[in-house]
Image (spheres, grey):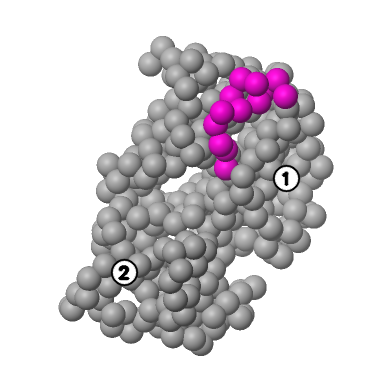
Amino acid sequence: MEFAALNHENLKEYYGKVLTGSKDLKTNACCCTGEAFSPAVRKTLGLIDDEILSKFYGCGSPLPPLLKGAVVLDLGCGTGRDVYVASRLVGPDGFVIGIDMTDEQLKVARRHIESQTKRFGYEKPNVEFRKGYIEDLAEIGIEDNSVDVVISNCVINLSPDKGAVFSEIFRVLKPGGELYFSDVFTGRRIPSHLKKDPVLQGECLAGALYIEDFRRMLQQIGCLDYRVVSSAPIDLENPEIEEKIGMVDFYSKTVRAFKLESLEDLCEDYGQTAIYLGTIPESPHAFLLDDHHHFLTGKPMLVCGNTAAMLEETRFAPHFKIMGDRSVHYGLFDCAPAAVKAARGEDRSGGACC
């Protein structure tokens, strides 16, 4: 607990007083973008007040499709850029809650509520900002099974108790709800002597998650499968920082995981097929579930049981036709990305994973 308190205070100082804007960052880990913005997000960013944008820190675009009417929770919202973008995407019937622990960041976010509400043409605000810690969402009144989508942009790495964060996320998500977040990951564990370095903490490096430890954390709370939507290596572009921690390979990843009891810890083959109906706004021709499931409109594609569940037991259900069930099992389903299969010299035709 002592380290957690120290870590929180260091981060409040770094993001509340040391940094005056994204230009003050010493590396690009907290401001790189691993994926392109969707047209709807890009259009909405043009409607966001300049102060919000200039003082915002993030490493991706954690805003999934199909948010209309949803309740969205943004963990570590900062000045509120993603909250306000989500505000436009959920529409006047949806609601967005932003959580942050830094007074200076929340002050910026809150003073733009009225102007952004008017700019979006809403009669009343559909956003709320609360001060608190992402490790304890109950303390700030986020109830069980109350949120459709949890988003976060390069913040979970900053937490000293990531296990608590993920436990809280899956507590507040509704059944079938989604965690969709961008963050910094590593290909190896961070050396212990670097984890308390305040600059490395603030630059989203000291707390970056080793990808396999992330997998284990989710499994411990009952989430047996997650999907990487996009991934890109991070070049620190700072010789002093690289001298300290350049032995670690860093990646900006956008990840999605669903609150589903039907998932298994491996992809199993039940002979199921999925057809994308082409009805998701802005995705008339194809839909990307993750980095190795690219569904073409109208084309039947073989899927594992987990993928079928992600499509028919979530808000995506109206947009897919799933054929088959889990009554007959055919063994393990090879869900490797196409690039991995190609490297193994395997046939690349025939399934959604290709």
Examine the rendered structure and indicate whether residue 55 appears above or below residue 195.
below
Nearer to the camera, 130 or 86: 86
User: Does the magenta segment cover residue 223?
Assistant: no
Q: Amino acid at mark 1?
A: Glu
Q: Which residue is mark 1?
A: 114
Which range of residues does the magenta coloring cover?
239-251
Task: Specify the farthest residue to the front.
Answer: 345
Q: Secondary structure at mark 2?
A: loop
> Mark 2, mark 1: which one is toward the viewer?
2
Give whichever of discs 2 and 1 has the lower sequence position: 1
Residue 35 image label: none
Q: Quadrant of residue 324?
A: bottom left
Nearer to the camera, 252 or 109: 252
Q: Quadrant of residue 24?
A: top right
Q: Is residue 349 visible?
A: yes
Q: Position of residue 331 (x, y in %)?
A: 22, 71
Examine the rendered structure and indicate whether residue 277 appears above or below residue 128.
below
Residue drawn at the location 34% of the way across and 40% of the way down: 217
Examine the rendered structure and indicate whether residue 247 appears above or below residue 90.
above
Nearer to the camera, 201 or 109: 201
Q: CA distance from mark 2 to mark 1?
A: 51 Å
Q: Position of residue 160 (x, y in %)?
A: 45, 25
Q: Which residue is mark 2?
A: 333
Indicate left or right for 151 with 246 as reference. left
